Image: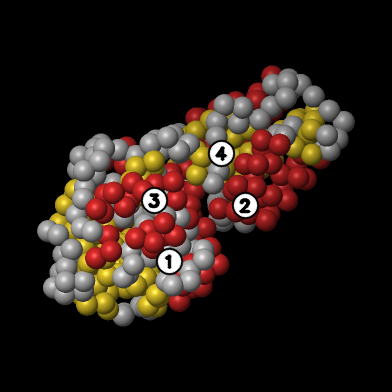
């Protein structure tokens, strides 16, 4: 793949991972990219690296622009392996490079790799690094997405190298946001936010505030497309998502053994339909939890259903609720539903998950064995009255 100059003397040298479908549990149906950027200045600077299996490809792409040993600095915005896995291979060739990173990132590098012989220079918010015509500055963004995270800003070109922030898991031959459908890019940005960034929304609010003083004309993240046209759109989305803004929408998610819980799911759906809500309806036999959570991001209601199974709930629902718990859907309204034969334990298990997730249960419906039509009608009526 040919390197692309994204601004004068700044090259995109990262790689596409077209076929990755599992990114630590996140279903990446459209693959992803590990973006890295090379700035040709008096001091040649590489921003971020890539996942280990792509080490050689990264080096080859750098070599299209310059002999790798001539690189002076590697700015490591984040140590997670998708951005640092190639470092051991890379540092064998970048014999003169100093790694510029946060103090936390220096420690993390040392906990991931044999760093003997690597030179580190740590930076903090407000520090600058003169590389010739440019003076790069740094903003610490801890927990977006690890404690070590920072972003790098180039004031001369008005580019923010944002690492994980504003990314999308989306592999494409196109590089910029005006070369693909904005709807598609924003949908993937939303999925990425819900599955990766959501637990750190308060830190995103702080980052957006700190970044608002910067004059930015391009955001170059470490995953997906570069934002050069639709900056207001993605910044607006991040503002909404980080402030947990909801729309009039419900997510109904369930698994069912013999169809009883599914019947209740339909009864619940009828109530939302009657009240003019938009909704998403997920049977966990056919849907992945990372798609469900994407719709939870801006939903007002999360409705979860399971029958009792072996003094517990369906494993698929337990996985979903564990995922919700980790990603924090605090402040949302919840509805629990299900069915049971002789032990109505399902509700207790699911209620515990909701309580620990900070979801307020506004209604619950649990029916014995097979629901009758009149039972289902009552559920729809009762819930409609509560909406
Ligand atoms: Fe793309 Fe937190 O790594």
Cα separation between marks 4 and 1: 26 Å
Compared with 249, 203 (above or below) is: below
What residue did someone put label 1 on?
Answer: 149
Q: How crowded is mark 4: few (under 14 residues within 10 Å), some or many (20 or more)?
A: many
Q: Residues within 10 Å of mark 3 (few under 14, many from 20)?
A: many
Compared with 195, 160 (above or below) is: below
Cα separation between marks 2 and 4: 12 Å
User: Of helix, strand and loop, which one carries label 2?
Assistant: helix
What residue did someone put label 4 on?
Answer: 289
What residue did someone put label 3 on?
Answer: 55
The mark nearer the N terminus, 4 or 1, is 1
Q: How crowded is mark 2: few (under 14 residues within 10 Å), some or many (20 or more)?
A: some
Q: Is mark 4 within 8 Å of ligand 1?
A: no
Q: Does the residue labelled 3 lie within 8 Å of ligand 1?
A: no
Q: Position of residue 350 (x, y in %)?
A: 71, 44
- Whether the residues at callouts 2 and 1 have beta carbons within 8 Å, the answer is no
Q: Would you identify the image quadrant in which residue 278 lies?
A: top left
Badge nearest the viewer, 2 or 1: 1
The mark nearer the N terminus, 3 or 2, is 3
**Residue 150 at least partly seen:** yes
Q: Does the residue labelled 1 lie within 8 Å of ligand 1?
A: yes
The mark nearer the N terminus, 2 or 4, is 4
User: Of helix, strand and loop, which one carries label 4?
Assistant: helix
The colour scheme of the drawn protein is secondary structure
Residue at coordinates 56% horizontally, 39% vertically from top-left?
289
Q: Is residue 62 left or right of residue 85?
A: left
What residue did someone put label 2 on?
Answer: 325
């Amino acid at each position: 793949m040919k390197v692309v100059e994204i601004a004068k003397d700044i090259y995109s040298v990262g790689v596409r991972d077209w076929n990755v479908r599992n990114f630590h549990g996140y279903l990446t149906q459209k693959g992803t990219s590990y973006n890295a950027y090379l700035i040709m200045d008096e001091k040649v600077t590489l921003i971020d690296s890539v996942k280990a299996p792509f080490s050689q490809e990264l080096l080859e792409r750098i070599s299209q622009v310059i002999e790798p040993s001539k690189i002076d600095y590697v700015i490591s915005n984040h140590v997670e392996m998708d951005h640092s896995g190639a470092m051991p291979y890379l540092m064998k060739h970048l014999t003169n490079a100093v790694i510029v990173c946060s103090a936390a990132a220096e420690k993390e590098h040392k906990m991931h790799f044999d760093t003997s012989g690597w030179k580190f220079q740590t930076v903090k918010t407000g520090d600058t690094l003169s590389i010739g015509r440019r003076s790069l500055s740094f903003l610490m963004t801890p927990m977006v997405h690890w404690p070590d995270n920072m972003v790098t800003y180039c004031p001369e070109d008005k580019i923010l190298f944002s690492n994980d922030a504003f990314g999308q898991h989306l592999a494409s031959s196109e590089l910029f946001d005006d070369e693909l459908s904005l709807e598609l890019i924003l949908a993937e940005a939303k999925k990425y936010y819900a599955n990766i960034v959501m637990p750190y929304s308060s830190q995103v609010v702080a980052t957006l505030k700190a970044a608002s003083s910067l004059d930015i004309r391009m955001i170059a993240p470490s995953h997906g497309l570069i934002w050069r046209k639709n900056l207001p759109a993605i910044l607006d989305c991040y503002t909404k998502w980080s402030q947990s803004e909801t729309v009039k929408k419900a997510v109904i998610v369930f698994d069912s053994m013999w169809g009883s819980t599914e019947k209740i799911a339909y009864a619940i759906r009828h109530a939302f339909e009657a009240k003019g809500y938009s909704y998403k309806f997920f049977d966990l036999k056919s849907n992945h939890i990372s798609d469900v959570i994407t719709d939870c991001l801006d939903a007002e209601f999360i409705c979860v259903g399971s029958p009792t199974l072996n003094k517990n709930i369906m494993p698929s629902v337990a996985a979903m609720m564990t995922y919700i718990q980790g990603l924090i859907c605090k402040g949302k309204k919840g509805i629990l539903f299900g069915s049971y034969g002789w032990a109505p334990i399902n509700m207790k298990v699911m209620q515990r998950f909701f309580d620990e997730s900070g979801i307020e249960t506004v209604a619950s419906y649990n029916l014995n064995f097979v629901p009758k039509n009149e039972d289902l009608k009552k559920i729809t009526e009762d819930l409609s009255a509560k909406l």
